[in-house]
Amino acid sequence: MHLSAKASRRLINILTVVSGIIIILLCIYWYRLGIFTSQAKMKAYLADKKIIGPIIFVLIQIIQVVIPIIPGGVSLLGGVIFFGPVAGFIYNYVGICVGSIIDFFLARFYGRPFILHIVSEKTLDKYMKWTKNQRKFNWFFAICIVAPMAPDDVLCLLAGLTDMKFWTYFWIIILGKPWTIAAYSFALEFGMDWLLRLTGH
């Protein structure tokens, strides 16, 4: 069955709500297990998930970049909570970079109709004005990838519609993504340490 762009976006919105509810329920469950307030319990919980855990997390991170049904901040937080700031950064980085590269090729091969299944035409048109000059768009894209809170997923899709060379895109992603991911990871780790101290653990 072929879904219209509007129906696809509605489905993604529904899945976002559902995934949000699931995340809340999981957080409640994990909180009751004590893994948010006890590093010993967290390590015990992850002891038998040393291989499959990171693989599943990276796959989830890739999927949420391509089909944004999970808020990026939530998945970044998940990496930090369960794997720590260093390993969490690595898994977040790998998943986000792979997902971003997939976004680029999906947009390049399937074009604007594909993107409209994920974002609205109004949102896409808002950023299309930056593509009139390829050189300026390359700089704009690079700055947004480094800057926090920028709509990275939309811009990655948009880059696929332009004449940007793949290797230009690749190096902007590879060199630009670490800064914001590291900033989020260590900020979240600081927040977790503060929470543990606050609760006396």
Image (cartoon, rainbow, N blue to C red):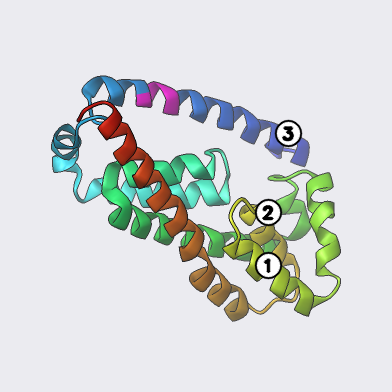
| Residue that carries the numbered disc 3 in the rendered image | 7
- The location of residue 191, given as percent across then percent down, is 38, 40
**Residue pictured at 44% horizontal, 43% vertical:** 75
Q: Quadrant of residue 182?
A: bottom left
Of the image marks 3 and 2, the number of the one nearer the N terminus: 3
Q: Is residue 36 visible?
A: no
> Is 186 placed left or right of 45 in the picture?
right
**Residue contact at pointers 3 and 2, CB within 8 angstroms:** no
Image quadrant in which the N terminus is located: top right
| Residue that carries the numbered disc 2 in the rendered image | 154
The front one of 195 and 185 is 195
- The location of residue 59, given as percent across then percent down, is 40, 50
- Magenta segment, which residues? 23-27
The front one of 145 and 134 is 145
The image's mark for residue 141 is: 1
Say which amino acid is labelled 2. Answer: Val
Q: Secondary structure at mark 2?
A: helix
Give neighbour class at mark 3: few <14, some 14-19, many 20+ (Cα, 10 Å): few
How far apart, in angstroms, are the residues tagged by discs 2 and 1? 11 Å
SS assignment for the magenta stretch, majority:
helix
Q: Secondary structure at mark 3?
A: helix
Image depth: mark 2 or mark 1 in front? 1
Give neighbour class at mark 1: few <14, some 14-19, many 20+ (Cα, 10 Å): many
**Residue pictured at 51% horizontal, 64% vertical:** 177
- The location of residue 103, given as percent across then percent down, is 60, 59
When the figure is inspected, residue 159 is found, relative to residue 4, above or below; the finding is below
Of the image marks 2 and 1, the number of the one nearer the N terminus: 1
Q: Secondary structure at mark 1?
A: helix
Of the image marks 3 and 1, the number of the one nearer the N terminus: 3
